[in-house]
Amino acid sequence: MSSSPPLSGVVPPVCTPLDASGEVDTASLARLVEHLVGGGVHGLFALGSSSEVAFLTDRQRAVALDTVVETVAGRVPVLAGVIDMTTPRVLVHAEAARKAGADALVATAPFYARTHPREIAAHFRAIRSAAGLPLYAYDLPVSVHSKLSTALVRELAEDGTLAGLKDSSGDEGGLRRLVVELGGRHGRAGGAAPSFSILTGSELTVDAALLAGADGVVPGLGNVDPAGYVRLYDAVRGGDLERAVEEQERLVELFGLVDAGPESEMGRNSSAIGAFKHALRLLGVFTHGTTAAPQIQLGEESVAHVERHLRGAGLLPVR
Amino acid sequence: MSSSPPLSGVVPPVCTPLDASGEVDTASLARLVEHLVGGGVHGLFALGSSSEVAFLTDRQRAVALDTVVETVAGRVPVLAGVIDMTTPRVLVHAEAARKAGADALVATAPFYARTHPREIAAHFRAIRSAAGLPLYAYDLPVSVHSKLSTALVRELAEDGTLAGLKDSSGDEGGLRRLVVELGGRHGRAGGAAPSFSILTGSELTVDAALLAGADGVVPGLGNVDPAGYVRLYDAVRGGDLERAVEEQERLVELFGLVDAGPESEMGRNSSAIGAFKHALRLLGVFTHGTTAAPQIQLGEESVAHVERHLRGAGLLPVR
Amino acid sequence: MSSSPPLSGVVPPVCTPLDASGEVDTASLARLVEHLVGGGVHGLFALGSSSEVAFLTDRQRAVALDTVVETVAGRVPVLAGVIDMTTPRVLVHAEAARKAGADALVATAPFYARTHPREIAAHFRAIRSAAGLPLYAYDLPVSVHSKLSTALVRELAEDGTLAGLKDSSGDEGGLRRLVVELGGRHGRAGGAAPSFSILTGSELTVDAALLAGADGVVPGLGNVDPAGYVRLYDAVRGGDLERAVEEQERLVELFGLVDAGPESEMGRNSSAIGAFKHALRLLGVFTHGTTAAPQIQLGEESVAHVERHLRGAGLLPVR
Amino acid sequence: MSSSPPLSGVVPPVCTPLDASGEVDTASLARLVEHLVGGGVHGLFALGSSSEVAFLTDRQRAVALDTVVETVAGRVPVLAGVIDMTTPRVLVHAEAARKAGADALVATAPFYARTHPREIAAHFRAIRSAAGLPLYAYDLPVSVHSKLSTALVRELAEDGTLAGLKDSSGDEGGLRRLVVELGGRHGRAGGAAPSFSILTGSELTVDAALLAGADGVVPGLGNVDPAGYVRLYDAVRGGDLERAVEEQERLVELFGLVDAGPESEMGRNSSAIGAFKHALRLLGVFTHGTTAAPQIQLGEESVAHVERHLRGAGLLPVR
């Protein structure tokens, strides 16, 4: 892996459709994969936070990952989240993902138990060593409640433990420091970690992140509008930043659909995931907009909010 | 369940001994159960945070719980932690615990994914309804990153969802409000949740918690000195608060063993659990002091620190 | 100061009454001082958080402190809060408090700017050295966003920098460790900091804190019911813990008045301070229940909530 | 103000030089103002966080602001920080700043006391109304511990309370939503708040922020290299994003000087401010590198670290 070019482009975290009983709806999931690959994305991230990985049983994770891998059929690489509290539990998921045919793994730092940075480093090294697949670190302090430091990521990039970083920390300044420390936007290929891939999870500032030297983006909203993110990516790569900003601003407006649920009655997470799923239902991709237990389901008014945003962004015809 | 007396007394979270390869050391675990039951404890909490539940695979959880249930052989009730991110994953553990013969379940609020209080309520109701066992809520903001409100606990106590609360939030004021809202120290038996059991996880203020109306304590340190906590409990119940305070102060000093590891090199969690385990090794209960990956192991100096505290508390002969 | 007995007993933080224009209502404040001293309290803490010190201009702070000192006229010691962001600004308040005749100062760690524990230690040493008055550390993480460690407090207690600690951290376990490290409940007088005074700000667990070895309490609710807290204190000191618990439970119920304001419309702080002030108005001590800008004022329904709690606790006749 | 164009460009927060006794060194401060204005900056922000405003007494704040206003002599606008805990205290600073000749005020949300969003709105409205000067909101959760929501800022922008926002929240996604809600990068002039100025405090991602629609930047590092930030700004405005990125990357490397102090011995804040001040001393602008009490001073090794970064960035000749 060390001499290959870093993974780049649009790599959406794949939503996991559920049927009315809460089981994985494989037909809808296969349609979503076609929707994404057809939209031109460069990779897929299965079993991420937007996939409700935290809500899926091991059996359901297996069904979802198998469906994604089989439907993709090698057209783009599939990254698989191996999200769990600590190393021994993550290793079980890693082995399952390897057997399922994932191309790479995505792991967070340990959570629930508080760990020291040296223990976090040992965690990533143990996963990399046991799994035999490229490993991406997933920096998600809002869920994991610790932040991967620039120094730690750099150390693990340079010694080959990590193939890349999915940065959902929102710390754009820290990300910029990492890019510069790895050689800067143009110098990274000649640096100490030439194939290290930096992917931002900040779907509202993709133009800026790409300008700053990120290789790609993992946008939850990319489930709804993969082609929009691909256009945005292509515009930056083609040097047309004006068009990139315009596309990004359209996507920022579309992102307003996540404010679907009333804050006083449901979590932000449930609202956002529910909005993505109902958007996919309204677009004919999913059969249901159901989210996993114990999340509260979107009501009629919330679904209308989602629909308005789809029309506003040109994804559904304006009535 | 509604007319039974609430669970009370000393209910230690049972440490999980590991062998050199990281597997559960069932012989040591059986010795620990005898050490605890022999020390007079009133119940056992298997698969809690001090059991490194976050570090155990599902297979290892099963081995540990089976060993505890079999060794206890009904002498005291066994509560089983069903710790995982969300409802569907917790339900899998709940079914396993039920089959293993646990007497009750202990669950936290969802974590990793952010949830709304209404979703947390739905979470506990779903577990209670599916598992058919008494359910204790485990309030542990340091791991779960949300706090169960007094209002929520009270609602779930009064409607019979919860059999009790294990409060490790450190919010003694909130706990006091709960006691008073449930009828006060003396009036709880006649209140709306007469069999609701309040257990504090604050092992340094047990005398105070019992004075305030808690029914019992779940002390991590109780692995090391179960008889000390039983004496403390008995002193309060017998009205001898002077002796209770004295015993508590001795246990506070003993608790200093958790500062074993150098903060600059390992996590607080690894240090505390490692200290408990090495103390049990020094006491002849465990064969190894090993903690699970990716935790850093205690060094020689740290083990000497633990030993000094055991001697200071009279658990090992002073040399 | 080093050989004097530690400050002990009930030391309420004195609310600052405001008139309709937001200026200090000195007549009401004098009445409050009489209410408190008449209730038997052992000291007064002016310019604390419950005094809305954060909302008072320097001129208003001076008016309030002068009024308290003059009205008390030496009957009990007056502690003065010197709350500001950093050392240089605190020193200005310390000089003013000294001139106004305060008997001791109360300072938090620096806030707004993030500081290191070594800098926090330097902060307290500079204040102690410049002001020439006994100095109490005010541990209030909810406002200051850092926690004073047991080790730091102990160091500053033993070297004579601090005369005491007002602990509003809610960390009862940490407080217990401090008590034990300073010699335990009975051994403190013979320890390295014999006159160090530990005051808890946790008004809902005073019985427990005194049992554990605290010297006194700084209860915001003590503005409303000073005599209740004095009875509670006397009961513990007299060894009648049953009566202490009963009194504490009554005060916990009374404390429910702080939930006066609707959470969706005002801050918790505004609600609690507004409730104390309206309670004092209903008791005939204050002319107005006004809180300082920009706090939202309690509405009619909220005031009725306060009144119900006063009646429930026997402070107003039941109608 | 409502029809004027928004404030734009590079507006550094002006460091406050101190002499050995901790008093404001007005000669050094005048030199810094010339250094900044000479570097081409578009405005100055006196009494901000990088000015150590939290450490300055009211008297020192007056000396610093007077010196800045007099030295600038109208060449660029001067914004004055009015940083304090709550409305009444901020109003005192606002009146002083108005009298000193500041062109605009910069205020945070209340801190120390917890306030509700409706109270925060009332806070800004009261300041705007009393002071008669344009008002900028300073969003700095790391100090203030609350985040200004996009909805709140928008409301206060559209009703004319706020002339602008200095965003140091690090929430680039939220900032992007604000830009889009106010009409998008090109449409803001025709929107509901046409003269509203958005300034980012994220000095490491200025190219990205300007691309996204920010009007300017308030870079602490701009004290050290004002001309570098002006070149960066001009490059973006001139459409030469390649050059902008290059300049930004150089400034990111230079920013490494803030890691001067050993983390185990001093706060991040002290290290960063000390590094800026010693850099200015090494550049011949300041006489001393002293920071205010209780901050720990940089040692020799730390100063050497600063010097290396100045040489690396071409601000001092390479030896």
Image: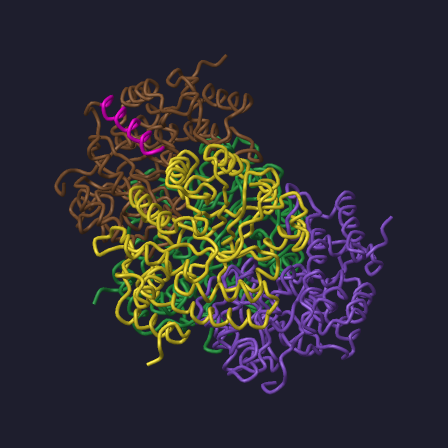
Chain colours: A yellow, B brown, C green, D purple
> Which region shows up in magenta?
B57-72
User: Is residue A114 in view?
Assistant: yes
Q: Nearer the viewer, residue B311 or C128?
A: B311
Q: Nearer the viewer, residue A191 or A166?
A: A191
| Residue C36 spot, x, y in % from top left | 42, 58
Q: Nearer the viewer, residue A179 or C144?
A: A179
Picture quadrant where residue A301 is located: bottom left
Q: In which quarter of the image is the C terminus of chain A?
A: bottom left
Is C101 left, or right, of D66 in this rendering?
A: left
User: Is residue C285 in view?
Assistant: no
Is B191 left, or right, of D239 in this rendering?
A: left
| Residue C101 spot, x, y in % from top left | 60, 58
Task: Say which residue appears at 32% left-offset and 34% top-offset.
Answer: B58
Q: Is the magenta stretch mostly helix, strand or loop?
A: helix
Picture quadrant where residue D233 is located: bottom right
Q: Which of C141 and C207 is in front in this view?
A: C141
Task: Say which residue appears at 73% left-offset and 53% top-offset.
Answer: D275
Q: In this view, does B131 lie above or below D61?
A: above
| Residue A137 spot, x, y in % from top left | 50, 45
Q: Is residue C314 magenta?
A: no
